[in-house]
Amino acid sequence: MRVLMLNADLRGMASFWRCWHLARELARLGHEICLVTVSRDRRIMPRRERIDGLTLIESPNLLDLVYGVGSGYGIVGIPYRMLKIARNRFDIVHAFEHRPNVLLPAMLSRTLNECPLVADWADWWGITGDGTGNLERSPWPVPQLDTAAEEFIHREADEVTAISTVLRNRALSLGIPPERVWLIPSGAPSDAIRPLNRELCRSELRISPSTYLLGYVGSLPRDLDMLLPALWTLRKAHPTLKLGIIAMSPPLLPPGAEDAVIRFGSVPFSRLPLYLGACDAFVLPLGDTMFNRARWPNKFGDYLAAGRPILCSNVGDVARIVEAEKCGLVWNNPSELIHGVERLMNDQETAQAMGSAARRLAEGRLSWRSLASEFLTVYQHASAHA
Protein backbone atom coordinates (compact mmCIF):
# COMPACT_ATOMS: atom_id res chain seq x y z
CA MET A 1 0.00 0.00 0.00
CA ARG A 2 1.04 3.61 -0.60
CA VAL A 3 0.41 5.43 2.66
CA LEU A 4 0.78 9.15 3.33
CA MET A 5 1.16 10.09 7.01
CA LEU A 6 0.55 13.73 7.90
CA ASN A 7 2.00 14.90 11.20
CA ALA A 8 1.45 18.36 12.67
CA ASP A 9 4.44 18.47 15.01
CA LEU A 10 8.11 19.28 14.62
CA ARG A 11 10.37 16.36 13.80
CA GLY A 12 11.28 14.61 17.04
CA MET A 13 8.43 16.14 19.06
CA ALA A 14 5.21 14.76 20.53
CA SER A 15 3.09 12.77 18.06
CA PHE A 16 5.98 12.57 15.58
CA TRP A 17 7.18 9.51 17.47
CA ARG A 18 3.87 7.67 17.07
CA CYS A 19 4.05 8.33 13.32
CA TRP A 20 7.73 7.51 13.02
CA HIS A 21 7.74 4.16 14.80
CA LEU A 22 4.61 3.05 12.94
CA ALA A 23 6.02 4.21 9.59
CA ARG A 24 9.26 2.26 10.12
CA GLU A 25 7.40 -0.97 10.84
CA LEU A 26 5.04 -0.57 7.88
CA ALA A 27 8.04 0.05 5.62
CA ARG A 28 9.67 -3.13 6.93
CA LEU A 29 6.53 -5.00 5.97
CA GLY A 30 7.00 -3.84 2.38
CA HIS A 31 4.62 -0.88 2.20
CA GLU A 32 5.51 2.45 0.58
CA ILE A 33 5.34 5.05 3.32
CA CYS A 34 5.69 8.83 3.03
CA LEU A 35 5.75 10.65 6.37
CA VAL A 36 5.41 14.43 6.32
CA THR A 37 6.36 16.29 9.50
CA VAL A 38 7.51 19.86 10.25
CA SER A 39 11.15 20.87 9.93
CA ARG A 40 12.99 22.25 12.93
CA ASP A 41 15.25 24.53 10.86
CA ARG A 42 13.90 24.88 7.30
CA ARG A 43 11.84 28.08 6.93
CA ILE A 44 11.12 28.12 3.20
CA MET A 45 12.43 24.94 1.57
CA PRO A 46 11.43 21.38 2.50
CA ARG A 47 13.89 18.63 3.35
CA ARG A 48 13.41 15.17 1.88
CA GLU A 49 15.33 12.02 2.77
CA ARG A 50 15.07 8.28 2.38
CA ILE A 51 15.60 6.63 5.75
CA ASP A 52 14.78 3.18 7.18
CA GLY A 53 12.94 2.23 4.00
CA LEU A 54 10.52 5.17 4.01
CA THR A 55 10.39 8.71 2.65
CA LEU A 56 10.58 11.39 5.33
CA ILE A 57 9.67 14.94 4.32
CA GLU A 58 10.11 17.95 6.56
CA SER A 59 7.77 20.70 5.40
CA PRO A 60 8.90 24.34 5.86
CA ASN A 61 8.20 25.83 9.29
CA LEU A 62 7.75 29.54 8.48
CA LEU A 63 5.15 30.85 10.97
CA ASP A 64 4.30 27.27 11.90
CA LEU A 65 4.32 28.06 15.62
CA VAL A 66 1.61 30.68 16.21
CA TYR A 67 1.54 32.32 19.63
CA GLY A 68 -1.31 30.99 21.76
CA VAL A 69 -2.47 28.30 19.35
CA GLY A 70 0.56 26.04 18.99
CA SER A 71 1.93 24.41 15.87
CA GLY A 72 0.47 23.59 12.48
CA TYR A 73 -0.11 27.01 10.88
CA GLY A 74 2.86 27.26 8.52
CA ILE A 75 2.07 29.62 5.66
CA VAL A 76 4.57 27.81 3.44
CA GLY A 77 4.22 24.33 4.90
CA ILE A 78 0.47 24.05 4.35
CA PRO A 79 0.55 24.94 0.61
CA TYR A 80 3.52 22.60 0.17
CA ARG A 81 1.59 19.73 1.70
CA MET A 82 -1.48 20.46 -0.42
CA LEU A 83 0.69 20.50 -3.56
CA LYS A 84 2.09 17.13 -2.51
CA ILE A 85 -1.46 15.79 -2.33
CA ALA A 86 -2.39 17.25 -5.72
CA ARG A 87 0.64 15.73 -7.47
CA ASN A 88 0.56 12.24 -5.97
CA ARG A 89 -1.93 9.48 -5.39
CA PHE A 90 -1.99 7.35 -2.26
CA ASP A 91 -3.99 4.34 -1.16
CA ILE A 92 -4.44 5.75 2.36
CA VAL A 93 -3.96 9.12 4.02
CA HIS A 94 -3.42 8.84 7.77
CA ALA A 95 -3.94 12.20 9.51
CA PHE A 96 -2.33 12.48 12.92
CA GLU A 97 -4.40 15.03 14.83
CA HIS A 98 -6.30 17.95 13.32
CA ARG A 99 -4.12 21.05 13.01
CA PRO A 100 -4.45 23.05 9.75
CA ASN A 101 -1.30 21.53 8.23
CA VAL A 102 -2.95 18.12 8.62
CA LEU A 103 -6.65 18.86 8.25
CA LEU A 104 -6.48 20.91 5.03
CA PRO A 105 -4.32 18.54 2.94
CA ALA A 106 -6.19 15.52 4.32
CA MET A 107 -9.55 16.93 3.25
CA LEU A 108 -8.10 17.94 -0.13
CA SER A 109 -6.98 14.36 -0.70
CA ARG A 110 -10.42 13.11 0.27
CA THR A 111 -12.07 15.47 -2.24
CA LEU A 112 -9.54 15.46 -5.08
CA ASN A 113 -8.43 11.84 -5.13
CA GLU A 114 -11.27 10.13 -3.23
CA CYS A 115 -8.55 8.64 -1.05
CA PRO A 116 -9.65 6.85 2.16
CA LEU A 117 -8.88 8.96 5.22
CA VAL A 118 -7.85 7.55 8.59
CA ALA A 119 -7.75 10.09 11.44
CA ASP A 120 -5.64 9.41 14.51
CA TRP A 121 -6.72 10.79 17.88
CA ALA A 122 -3.85 10.95 20.38
CA ASP A 123 -4.66 13.90 22.68
CA TRP A 124 -7.64 15.86 23.95
CA TRP A 125 -6.96 19.32 22.55
CA GLY A 126 -10.09 21.40 22.97
CA ILE A 127 -12.72 21.80 25.66
CA THR A 128 -12.73 18.96 28.20
CA GLY A 129 -15.04 20.17 30.95
CA ASP A 130 -12.35 20.32 33.61
CA GLY A 131 -10.19 22.94 31.92
CA THR A 132 -7.24 20.65 31.14
CA GLY A 133 -7.44 20.34 27.34
CA ASN A 134 -4.20 20.96 25.48
CA LEU A 135 -5.31 24.44 24.42
CA GLU A 136 -8.25 25.00 26.73
CA ARG A 137 -6.50 27.80 28.63
CA SER A 138 -5.74 29.71 25.44
CA PRO A 139 -7.72 32.92 24.74
CA TRP A 140 -11.14 32.72 23.11
CA PRO A 141 -11.88 31.48 20.45
CA VAL A 142 -8.89 29.10 20.29
CA PRO A 143 -10.42 26.31 22.46
CA GLN A 144 -13.73 26.52 20.58
CA LEU A 145 -12.05 26.37 17.17
CA ASP A 146 -9.78 23.54 18.24
CA THR A 147 -12.72 21.53 19.55
CA ALA A 148 -14.59 22.05 16.29
CA ALA A 149 -11.57 21.04 14.20
CA GLU A 150 -10.72 17.87 16.13
CA GLU A 151 -14.34 16.73 16.09
CA PHE A 152 -14.79 17.60 12.42
CA ILE A 153 -11.86 15.59 11.06
CA HIS A 154 -12.79 12.51 13.05
CA ARG A 155 -16.42 12.66 11.98
CA GLU A 156 -15.36 13.02 8.35
CA ALA A 157 -12.75 10.25 8.40
CA ASP A 158 -13.46 6.80 7.03
CA GLU A 159 -11.79 5.27 10.10
CA VAL A 160 -10.62 6.64 13.46
CA THR A 161 -7.63 5.27 15.38
CA ALA A 162 -7.83 6.31 19.04
CA ILE A 163 -4.84 6.05 21.35
CA SER A 164 -6.89 5.53 24.54
CA THR A 165 -10.22 4.31 25.89
CA VAL A 166 -11.25 7.89 26.74
CA LEU A 167 -10.68 9.11 23.18
CA ARG A 168 -12.37 6.05 21.73
CA ASN A 169 -15.42 6.79 23.87
CA ARG A 170 -15.31 10.43 22.81
CA ALA A 171 -15.34 9.38 19.17
CA LEU A 172 -18.34 7.14 19.82
CA SER A 173 -20.10 10.01 21.62
CA LEU A 174 -19.89 12.02 18.39
CA GLY A 175 -22.05 9.42 16.67
CA ILE A 176 -19.21 7.75 14.78
CA PRO A 177 -20.21 4.09 14.21
CA PRO A 178 -18.32 1.64 16.47
CA GLU A 179 -17.08 -0.37 13.50
CA ARG A 180 -15.15 2.71 12.33
CA VAL A 181 -13.42 3.41 15.67
CA TRP A 182 -10.30 1.44 16.60
CA LEU A 183 -8.45 1.53 19.91
CA ILE A 184 -4.72 1.24 19.15
CA PRO A 185 -2.24 2.52 21.75
CA SER A 186 1.32 3.54 21.07
CA GLY A 187 3.99 0.89 21.23
CA ALA A 188 7.49 0.27 22.47
CA PRO A 189 10.49 0.79 20.17
CA SER A 190 12.00 -2.52 21.26
CA ASP A 191 14.46 -2.61 18.36
CA ALA A 192 15.90 0.84 19.10
CA ILE A 193 15.85 0.68 22.91
CA ARG A 194 17.13 -2.42 24.66
CA PRO A 195 17.94 -3.20 28.30
CA LEU A 196 21.56 -2.25 28.94
CA ASN A 197 23.97 -3.03 31.74
CA ARG A 198 23.30 -0.51 34.48
CA GLU A 199 26.89 -0.30 35.72
CA LEU A 200 28.34 0.26 32.24
CA CYS A 201 25.80 3.01 31.52
CA ARG A 202 26.60 4.74 34.79
CA SER A 203 30.30 4.52 34.17
CA GLU A 204 29.91 6.31 30.85
CA LEU A 205 27.61 8.95 32.36
CA ARG A 206 29.76 9.34 35.49
CA ILE A 207 26.98 8.43 37.90
CA SER A 208 27.96 6.86 41.21
CA PRO A 209 27.26 3.10 41.38
CA SER A 210 25.72 3.65 44.84
CA THR A 211 23.03 6.01 43.53
CA TYR A 212 19.48 4.70 43.33
CA LEU A 213 18.27 6.49 40.19
CA LEU A 214 14.63 7.06 39.32
CA GLY A 215 14.29 8.06 35.68
CA TYR A 216 11.78 10.56 34.33
CA VAL A 217 11.39 11.67 30.69
CA GLY A 218 9.56 14.96 30.21
CA SER A 219 9.32 18.48 31.52
CA LEU A 220 5.72 19.07 32.63
CA PRO A 221 5.89 21.00 35.94
CA ARG A 222 2.52 19.68 37.12
CA ASP A 223 3.69 16.10 36.77
CA LEU A 224 6.94 16.75 38.61
CA ASP A 225 5.09 18.54 41.41
CA MET A 226 3.46 15.19 42.18
CA LEU A 227 6.88 13.60 42.67
CA LEU A 228 8.65 16.16 44.81
CA PRO A 229 6.96 15.48 48.20
CA ALA A 230 7.76 11.77 47.88
CA LEU A 231 11.29 12.53 46.72
CA TRP A 232 12.05 14.73 49.76
CA THR A 233 10.72 12.09 52.14
CA LEU A 234 12.67 9.29 50.46
CA ARG A 235 15.87 11.32 50.50
CA LYS A 236 15.75 11.61 54.29
CA ALA A 237 15.94 7.82 54.67
CA HIS A 238 17.89 7.14 51.46
CA PRO A 239 20.36 9.99 50.76
CA THR A 240 21.73 8.23 47.66
CA LEU A 241 18.37 8.30 45.88
CA LYS A 242 18.12 10.76 42.99
CA LEU A 243 15.71 11.70 40.22
CA GLY A 244 17.20 11.77 36.72
CA ILE A 245 15.28 14.13 34.41
CA ILE A 246 15.61 13.79 30.63
CA ALA A 247 13.97 16.88 29.14
CA MET A 248 14.50 19.38 26.34
CA SER A 249 13.51 22.23 28.68
CA PRO A 250 14.30 21.12 32.25
CA PRO A 251 11.65 22.44 34.64
CA LEU A 252 12.34 24.92 37.41
CA LEU A 253 12.89 23.25 40.75
CA PRO A 254 12.56 24.69 44.26
CA PRO A 255 15.67 25.75 46.19
CA GLY A 256 17.56 22.82 47.67
CA ALA A 257 16.40 20.39 45.01
CA GLU A 258 19.56 20.36 42.94
CA ASP A 259 21.34 17.74 45.03
CA ALA A 260 18.39 15.37 44.65
CA VAL A 261 18.11 15.75 40.87
CA ILE A 262 20.37 14.96 37.92
CA ARG A 263 19.46 17.13 34.94
CA PHE A 264 20.41 15.23 31.81
CA GLY A 265 18.87 17.85 29.54
CA SER A 266 17.88 17.09 25.96
CA VAL A 267 19.03 13.65 24.81
CA PRO A 268 18.99 12.52 21.15
CA PHE A 269 16.85 9.44 20.63
CA SER A 270 19.91 7.47 19.55
CA ARG A 271 21.47 8.11 22.98
CA LEU A 272 18.28 7.59 25.00
CA PRO A 273 18.95 3.87 25.71
CA LEU A 274 22.16 4.81 27.54
CA TYR A 275 20.36 7.18 29.92
CA LEU A 276 17.44 4.82 30.47
CA GLY A 277 19.88 1.99 31.07
CA ALA A 278 21.48 3.93 33.94
CA CYS A 279 18.17 3.97 35.87
CA ASP A 280 16.94 1.53 38.51
CA ALA A 281 13.26 2.30 37.84
CA PHE A 282 11.10 4.83 36.05
CA VAL A 283 8.36 7.13 37.30
CA LEU A 284 5.27 8.07 35.30
CA PRO A 285 3.30 10.72 37.22
CA LEU A 286 -0.02 11.83 35.73
CA GLY A 287 -2.48 14.09 37.53
CA ASP A 288 -6.07 12.87 37.48
CA THR A 289 -7.41 15.13 34.74
CA MET A 290 -9.43 14.49 31.61
CA PHE A 291 -6.41 15.39 29.49
CA ASN A 292 -4.21 12.81 31.24
CA ARG A 293 -6.90 10.13 31.27
CA ALA A 294 -7.01 10.47 27.48
CA ARG A 295 -3.23 10.16 27.06
CA TRP A 296 -0.89 7.33 26.27
CA PRO A 297 2.52 8.97 26.89
CA ASN A 298 5.26 8.08 24.40
CA LYS A 299 7.66 7.68 27.33
CA PHE A 300 5.70 4.63 28.50
CA GLY A 301 6.86 2.64 25.47
CA ASP A 302 10.44 3.79 26.01
CA TYR A 303 10.28 2.68 29.64
CA LEU A 304 8.93 -0.74 28.66
CA ALA A 305 11.63 -1.25 26.06
CA ALA A 306 14.38 -0.37 28.58
CA GLY A 307 13.27 -3.25 30.82
CA ARG A 308 12.99 -1.53 34.20
CA PRO A 309 10.07 -1.38 36.70
CA ILE A 310 7.59 1.47 36.14
CA LEU A 311 6.02 3.41 39.03
CA CYS A 312 2.84 4.76 37.45
CA SER A 313 0.16 6.97 38.98
CA ASN A 314 -3.33 5.50 38.88
CA VAL A 315 -4.56 7.41 35.82
CA GLY A 316 -5.46 6.28 32.31
CA ASP A 317 -4.95 3.11 30.30
CA VAL A 318 -1.24 2.84 31.08
CA ALA A 319 -1.99 2.23 34.77
CA ARG A 320 -4.26 -0.69 33.85
CA ILE A 321 -1.47 -2.15 31.70
CA VAL A 322 1.08 -1.88 34.53
CA GLU A 323 -1.32 -3.65 36.86
CA ALA A 324 -2.32 -6.39 34.44
CA GLU A 325 1.18 -7.13 33.17
CA LYS A 326 2.90 -6.78 36.58
CA CYS A 327 5.62 -4.63 35.00
CA GLY A 328 5.64 -2.11 37.83
CA LEU A 329 3.57 -0.59 40.62
CA VAL A 330 0.57 1.73 40.53
CA TRP A 331 0.27 4.50 43.14
CA ASN A 332 -2.49 6.90 44.16
CA ASN A 333 -0.64 9.35 46.40
CA PRO A 334 2.91 10.26 47.56
CA SER A 335 2.85 7.81 50.47
CA GLU A 336 2.07 4.90 48.11
CA LEU A 337 4.84 6.07 45.79
CA ILE A 338 7.28 6.13 48.72
CA HIS A 339 6.27 2.60 49.71
CA GLY A 340 6.63 1.43 46.10
CA VAL A 341 10.13 2.86 45.69
CA GLU A 342 11.29 1.35 48.95
CA ARG A 343 9.83 -1.99 47.97
CA LEU A 344 11.86 -1.98 44.75
CA MET A 345 14.99 -0.83 46.58
CA ASN A 346 14.72 -3.66 49.12
CA ASP A 347 13.54 -6.45 46.82
CA GLN A 348 15.81 -6.77 43.82
CA GLU A 349 14.20 -10.04 42.76
CA THR A 350 10.80 -8.40 42.41
CA ALA A 351 12.33 -5.41 40.63
CA GLN A 352 14.06 -7.67 38.11
CA ALA A 353 10.88 -9.66 37.53
CA MET A 354 8.95 -6.45 36.83
CA GLY A 355 11.65 -5.23 34.46
CA SER A 356 11.58 -8.54 32.60
CA ALA A 357 7.78 -8.32 32.34
CA ALA A 358 8.12 -4.82 30.89
CA ARG A 359 10.53 -6.03 28.24
CA ARG A 360 8.31 -8.99 27.33
CA LEU A 361 5.43 -6.61 26.77
CA ALA A 362 7.68 -4.39 24.65
CA GLU A 363 8.62 -7.35 22.46
CA GLY A 364 5.09 -8.77 22.35
CA ARG A 365 1.65 -7.19 22.37
CA LEU A 366 2.94 -3.62 22.55
CA SER A 367 5.75 -3.98 20.03
CA TRP A 368 5.41 -1.67 17.06
CA ARG A 369 5.56 -4.74 14.81
CA SER A 370 2.41 -6.08 16.46
CA LEU A 371 0.62 -2.72 16.40
CA ALA A 372 1.55 -2.14 12.75
CA SER A 373 -0.52 -5.22 11.89
CA GLU A 374 -3.50 -3.65 13.66
CA PHE A 375 -3.09 -0.42 11.72
CA LEU A 376 -2.92 -2.42 8.47
CA THR A 377 -6.27 -3.97 9.35
CA VAL A 378 -7.67 -0.45 9.70
CA TYR A 379 -6.24 0.57 6.33
CA GLN A 380 -7.71 -2.50 4.65
CA HIS A 381 -11.09 -1.81 6.23
CA ALA A 382 -10.96 1.80 5.04
CA SER A 383 -10.07 0.74 1.49
CA ALA A 384 -12.85 -1.85 1.38
CA HIS A 385 -15.55 0.54 2.61
CA ALA A 386 -14.45 3.84 1.06
Image (tube, rainbow, N blue to C red):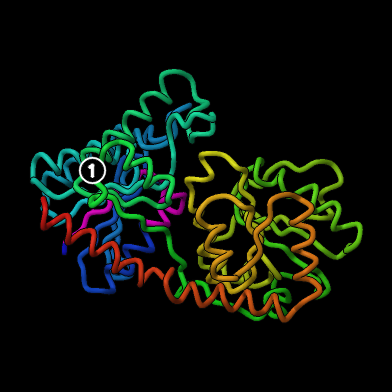
Picture layout, residue 327 above or below residue 264:
below
Q: Residues within 10 Å of mark 1 (few under 14, many from 20)?
A: many
Q: Residue 341: name its quadrant.
A: bottom right
**Residue position for label 1:** 81
Picture layout, residue 332 above or below residue 199:
above
Give yes or no for residue 17 being in the magenta stretch. yes
Give yes or no for residue 352 being in the magenta stretch. no
Q: Of residues 202 and 292, which is closer to you in this image?
A: 292
* Residue in the picture at 37% in, 47% down: 168
* Residue in the picture at 72% in, 79% down: 199
* Residue 364, horizontal then vertical, whole percent: 43, 75
| Left-right relation of 110 to 365 | left
Residue range (magenta): 2-18
User: Looking at the figure, which quarter contains the N terminus?
Assistant: bottom left
Q: Residue furthest top?
A: 140
* Residue 131, horizontal then vertical, whole percent: 53, 29
